[in-house]
């Protein structure tokens, strides 16, 4: 049995936000909402948060799982790498090729928009500001609205709050 996240009176606002951004607000398409939430949950590395997403949105399809794993795996490298490079001026590296990444066309992502949403979700959790900015710019270039992008940001924030609430439960109880 998975530990359930118990939202207390002190976290009622976070529960409301979580429910609204996952199920009520429709700025994001259902697939983009699902990919954003699953990517953030995977990056949170908390089984209770994953259970919340599964309960609200279901399990990703096999292809969605494949593309989520690409996004999460790639951001686990690029987020800390490019954050670090932003602090120091180096005359070497600084490219995806230097990280031994296959090209985007080689990995054959079928839903580029959902992939970028997954990348921003992971980058929010990881604090990968350079990657976050790059993937948000890609979404804007692909025609995504500010409202849709903002909903994705709120999904990540709400799931990070759920992770904190789950931790708080173990700290005090």
Image (spheres, grey):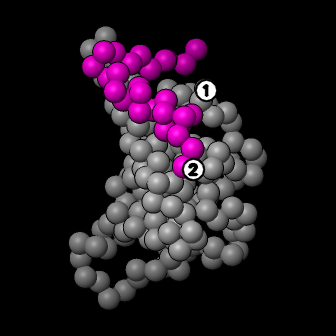
Residue 154 at x, y = what percent?
Answer: 41, 44
Q: To which quarter of the image does residue 88 belong?
A: bottom left
**Counting other residues with Cα less than 10 Å from the Cα at mark 2, is it few (<14), some (14-19), or many (20 or more)?**
many
Q: Residue furthest right?
A: 62
Q: Nearer the viewer, residue 80 or 157?
A: 157
In this rendering, position of residue 167 left or right of residue 29:
left
In this rendering, position of residue 153 left or right of residue 164:
right
Residue 144 at x, y = what percent?
Answer: 54, 63
- Residue at image position (57%, 44%) is 26
Q: Which residue is mark 1?
A: 55
- Residue at image position (69%, 75%) is 105
- Does the rendering let one see residue 26? yes
Q: Nearer the viewer, residue 74 or 114?
A: 114
Residue 164 at x, y = what percent?
Answer: 34, 31
- Residue at image position (66%, 56%) is 67
159 relative to 36, above or below: above
The quadrant of the rendering that contains the N terminus is: top right
Element assignment for label 1:
helix
- Over which residues does the magenta segment extend? 1-28
Q: Residue furthest bottom?
A: 91
**Counting other residues with Cα less than 10 Å from the Cα at mark 1, is it few (<14), some (14-19), or many (20 or more)?**
few
Q: Nearer the viewer, residue 53 or 103?
A: 53
Residue 99 magenta: no
- Residue at image position (64%, 65%) is 112
Q: Which residue is mark 2?
A: 28
The quadrant of the rendering that contains the C terminus is: top left
Q: Which mark is residue 169?
A: none
Q: Residue furthest top?
A: 173
Residue 5 magenta: yes
Is disc 2 in contact with disc 1, using a CB cutoff of under 8 Å?
no
Element assignment for label 2:
loop
Q: CA distance from mark 2 to mark 1?
A: 18 Å
């Amino acid at each position: 049995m998975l530990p359930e996240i118990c939202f207390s009176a002190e976290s009622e606002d976070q529960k409301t936000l979580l429910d609204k951004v996952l199920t009520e607000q429709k700025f994001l398409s259902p697939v983009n909402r699902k990919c954003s939430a699953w990517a953030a949950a995977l990056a949170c590395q908390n089984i209770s948060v994953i259970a919340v997403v599964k309960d609200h949105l279901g399990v990703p399809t096999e292809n969605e799982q494949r593309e989520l794993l690409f996004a999460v795996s790639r951001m686990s490298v690029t987020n800390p790498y490019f954050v670090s490079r932003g602090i120091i001026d180096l005359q070497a590296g600084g490219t995806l090729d230097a990280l031994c990444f296959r090209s985007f066309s080689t990995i054959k992502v079928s839903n580029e928009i959902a992939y970028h949403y997954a990348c921003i979700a992971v980058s929010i959790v990881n604090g990968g500001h350079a990657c976050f900015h790059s993937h948000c710019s890609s979404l804007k270039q692909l025609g995504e609205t500010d409202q849709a992008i903002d909903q994705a940001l709120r999904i990540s924030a709400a799931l990070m709050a759920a992770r904190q609430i789950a931790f708080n439960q173990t700290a005090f109880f």
